[in-house]
Amino acid sequence: MLLSFLLAAILPVTSQRDFDRLNERIDSVITAGERQVEVCFEPGTYFFKEEHLAFSGIEAKDVDLRLMGNGATLIGSRDSESSPAFENGFVDLKRLSVHDALAPVRKAGFWPIRVPFRKGLYVVRAKGEADVSEADAAGMKIILSQWFVGAVYDVVKIHRGWIYFRRVPYRTRIWSELRFGRCLPRYMLFAPRKAASAYACAASNFLSVDDSRFGSVVLDSLRFLGNGDGGRLLRFSGMNADSLVIRRCTFEGIRSRGILVERTDHFRLRDNAFLEGALNQVYVDKTASDAEIVGNRFIRNGLLMTNDPVVDCKGSEFLVRNNYFEDFSYSAIGAGLHFTDTSGLVTSGVIENNEICMSEAFRQPPVRSLIDGGAIYVWTQNKYLVVKENYIHDIAGPHGNRGIFGDDGVVNMHVIDNTVLGVRGSYAIDVRRVHRVGYLRNSAIRKVNVGIVIKGNRYDGRIRVHARKNDPGSYIGGNYILK
């Protein structure tokens, strides 16, 4: 392989012009018959447009494509005609760092209240907030915790400690915090004027590969700094290759969801860093097999308070190993399919030897998190899922923030030899009894809480675990409480 790349077609990127023409340059050398193509970046800063690299319907099964970043920084380009908006990611170009345009999380003084005779207008108590007129509130947003959703509403004005906002429908009700958590909601404000001094990224997708065939694709040592909301930063959909490798890259301040892998096998994510991401960073779809996510660092992600796990694996035969997760709003690692998914028992894999925690600063109330989550969160339907030898510690939240959480009558889940310490206010391990899921009209699975093995775990605090009686595939025992 090394000798073949010594004979590769080298495409240098030394200027923005080189970068802007990169897609056509790659297409050109592949059409010319080159089988080893290496894009070699000179260190520097480059701005990518929407779908900067886009390959669709490419038949290049003998082509190995490498993007060698050498530490180059790639930033989503801005829309010069638009003012800063909630959908933008923001970057300080002088320091080449993320600019956080959200105000710190605060706890509301009361649950939302409807304003009489004003359709769709609500207020929430926010003592201490400065007044903002209706004219100055243009483009302003409030993210309001709403059970497992961070609902986003338009702010109309702020007056005498009340935030006025326009309600739109969500899948959770506006008073969900009262019903499920008995806790006051948290909120964050976005004000365009706070972001005015920063570079507003609008382009979301740098690379997309759709229904194409390659020998291999490698992304190495690139730094992605900021993009806009919209499509995934990297999308691999229906790519047939011997391997897809992303290694030694940094993903920082990504405003959209990060990496999507669907109908694409043999994905390898190794030794990367994901920092200050707004939403989910890695999604392995149920149509993908043999994904490995190994040796990465995920620090301060899911910052828009959504129930997207930082890493979410739905596919078959995946491996999530030796990663470090710190600070997240709902879940660090997710797996399994919801009980309404008609695909059946698809998810299979191993989650092992990961460290998951929250820093002391992040755990200070009001915590920037939603209720009813888990550091490792598992949906109902799994073919075979092993969660073993993970170290989970110092987890906090407003209500129901577990260490390991098997939800909605989870099936075929083995929880073995994990250490779970310092889960504040909830269960270290919670595999709860929800037999009713099997009787719901919209449920795709009829027998739940089976195939449960929970053994050899060490924990302090409390656990709540359940498996059906007389289920030959279940076993609960040999777990140790540490005092």
Image (spheres, rainbow, N blue to C red):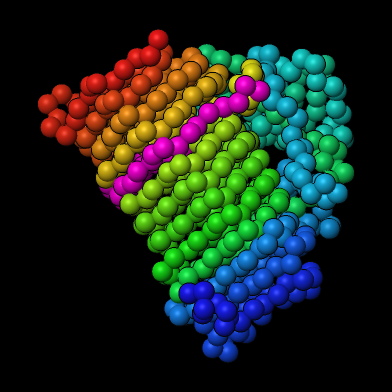
Q: Is residue 122 left or right of residue 8?
A: right
Q: Which residues are magenta?
A: 333-361
Instruction: Specify whether residue 374 is in view.
Output: no
Instruction: Specify whether residue 471 is in view.
Output: yes
Give residue 341's quadrant in the image. top left
Image coords of residue 406 (percent x, y):
35, 30
Name the residue: 80% across, 35% down.
191
- Is residue 354 inside the magenta stretch? yes
Name the residue: 63% across, 58% down.
221
Give residue 33's quadrant in the image. bottom right
Instruction: Give the answer, above or below, for where 84 lies relative to 265.
Output: above
Q: Nearer the viewer, residue 161 or 102?
A: 102
Q: Nearer the viewer, residue 186 or 19?
A: 19
Give residue 72's quadrant in the image. bottom right
Instruction: Give the answer, above or below, for where 301 lies relative to 250.
Output: above
Q: Residue furthest bottom?
A: 32
Instruction: Give the answer, above or below, for where 320 lies relative to 157.
Output: below
Q: Is residue 215 left or right of residue 105?
A: left
Image coords of residue 15 (percent x, y):
79, 70
Examine the residues drawn in magenta and state their main secondary structure: loop
Q: Residue furthest top?
A: 483
Image coords of residue 182 (percent x, y):
52, 13
The quadrant of the picture occupied by the C terminus is top left
Name the residue: 85% across, 22% down.
130
- Is residue 385 inside the magenta stretch? no
Image coords of residue 222 (percent x, y):
65, 58
Name the residue: 48% across, 74% down.
1
